[in-house]
Image (spheres, rainbow, N blue to C red):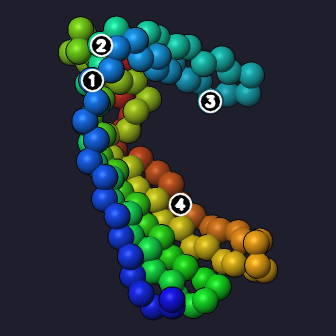
Amino acid sequence: MCGVPDKTHIIVRNDVENKIITELWNRTPGAVLTYHNVNQAKINGWEANAWYDLTQDLSLKANYSQTNAEDKQRCAPFTLTPEDSYSVQVKWLALEGLSTFLGIITPVNNICAPK
């Protein structure tokens, strides 16, 4: 139905064993990802979504998430995991079963770089 806003929210709390994370990522062509095993990890966070149908074929969606992911043994945050991120998206339903979108997805703050 057009003009009716909707929303969801999710709360996350996980204790994880043997989590594989990306340790180093060089964004140059031909770059190789480096992985690291985390024996014990704690992941907390929350996410909120909202969307609104502007017309029958055009909708607006927004998302915000906050994540606290930590290696419990080293008491260090995960590398390349943003603490805060958001996205905004406009979706167009061109034909029944065919849609496209334009959006922005970005971390709000700096991602922890490996030391």
Q: Are marks 4 and 3 in contact (CB under 8 Å)?
A: no
Q: CA–CA distance between discs 3 and 1?
A: 30 Å
**Amino acid type of disc 3?**
Arg
Going from the N terminus, do you reach mark 4 or mark 3 first? 3
Going from the N terminus, do you reach mark 2 or mark 3 first? 3
Q: Look at 31% across and 52% down and name the residue there.
A: 10
Q: Which residue is mark 2?
A: 40
The image quadrant of residue 100 is: bottom right
Kind of element beneath mark 1: strand
Q: CA–CA distance between discs 2 and 3?
A: 28 Å
Q: CA–CA distance between discs 2 and 1?
A: 7 Å
Front-most of residues 87 and 94: 94
Going from the N terminus, do you reach mark 4 or mark 2 first? 2
Nearest-to-viewer mark from 4 and 2: 2
The image quadrant of residue 17 is: top left
Q: In the rendering, at what x and y percent does residue 87 appear?
A: 46, 59
Q: Residues within 10 Å of mark 3 (few under 14, many from 20)?
A: few
Q: CA–CA distance between discs 4 and 2?
A: 33 Å
Q: Are marks 3 and 1 in contact (CB under 8 Å)?
A: no
Q: CA–CA distance between discs 4 and 3?
A: 19 Å
Nearest-to-viewer mark from 2 and 3: 2
Q: Are marks 4 and 2 in contact (CB under 8 Å)?
A: no
Q: CA–CA distance between discs 4 and 1?
A: 31 Å
Q: Are marks 2 and 1 in contact (CB under 8 Å)?
A: yes
Looking at the image, residue 10 lies above or below residue 75: below
Q: Which label is found at residue 27?
A: 3
3 vs 41, left or right, is right
Q: Which residue is mark 4?
A: 104
> Is residue 115 in sight in this rendering?
no
**Amino acid type of disc 1?**
Asp
Q: Look at 38% across and 76% down and name the residue there.
A: 6
Kind of element beneath mark 3: loop
